[in-house]
Amino acid sequence: MHRTTRRPSFTYRGLELSHPYVVLLELASMLEHDDLVIAVDSLISRDPPLRGASLEAIWAATDSYEARWGAPALRKALLDARPNTDSPGETRTRLLLLRAGFPEPVINHP
């Protein structure tokens, strides 16, 4: 059996669920960097599944867990995450362009 300290959670339709920021920390030890950035971007998208989510709030949650779980990988992903994105493809393209040396693209340019 694996035991850890109590983590933030919430109840949805009678089920106790891990808080999305905790899930990000757990996924950070399993996902590739770009996939983790996509997961973060989806939480801070223009139409986020979690109201009130922000990069600042995710940073604060990550800092509170120091080096546990995937905190180092999540911190690295947070540096590449951007609010108001709309799709995984948008994030992948942005990361690809940045790695190729292009300037930061404008997100959701009309």
Image (spheres, grey):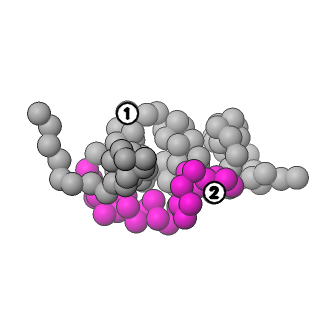
- Total numbered badges shown on the rendered structure: 2
Front-most of residues 49 and 13: 13
For the point 17% across and 47% down, which residue is it? 4
| Pointer 2 residue | 83
Q: Secondary structure at mark 2?
A: loop
Instruction: State how far apart marks 2 and 1 are (Cα).
Output: 23 Å
Quadrant position of residue 82:
bottom right
Q: Specify whether residue 69 is in view.
A: yes
- How far from the left and from the top, in percent, is residue 98? 66, 44
Secondary structure under badge 1? Answer: loop
Q: Is residue 84 left or right of residue 66?
A: right
Q: Is residue 51 a member of the stretch shown in magenta?
A: yes
Residue 19 in percent (x, y) is at 39, 52
Q: Say which residue appears at 49% left-offset and 48% top-offset.
A: 77
Relative to 86, 41 lies left or right:
left
x then y, percent, for residue 61: 38, 61
Q: Which residues are magenta?
A: 43-68
Q: Nearer the viewer, residue 51 or 106?
A: 51
Q: Position of residue 17 (x, y in %)?
A: 36, 46
Tell me which residue sits at (53%, 48%) in the image. 40
Residue at 78% from the left image edge and 51% from the top image edge: 108
Task: Identify the disc placed on residue 30.
Answer: 1
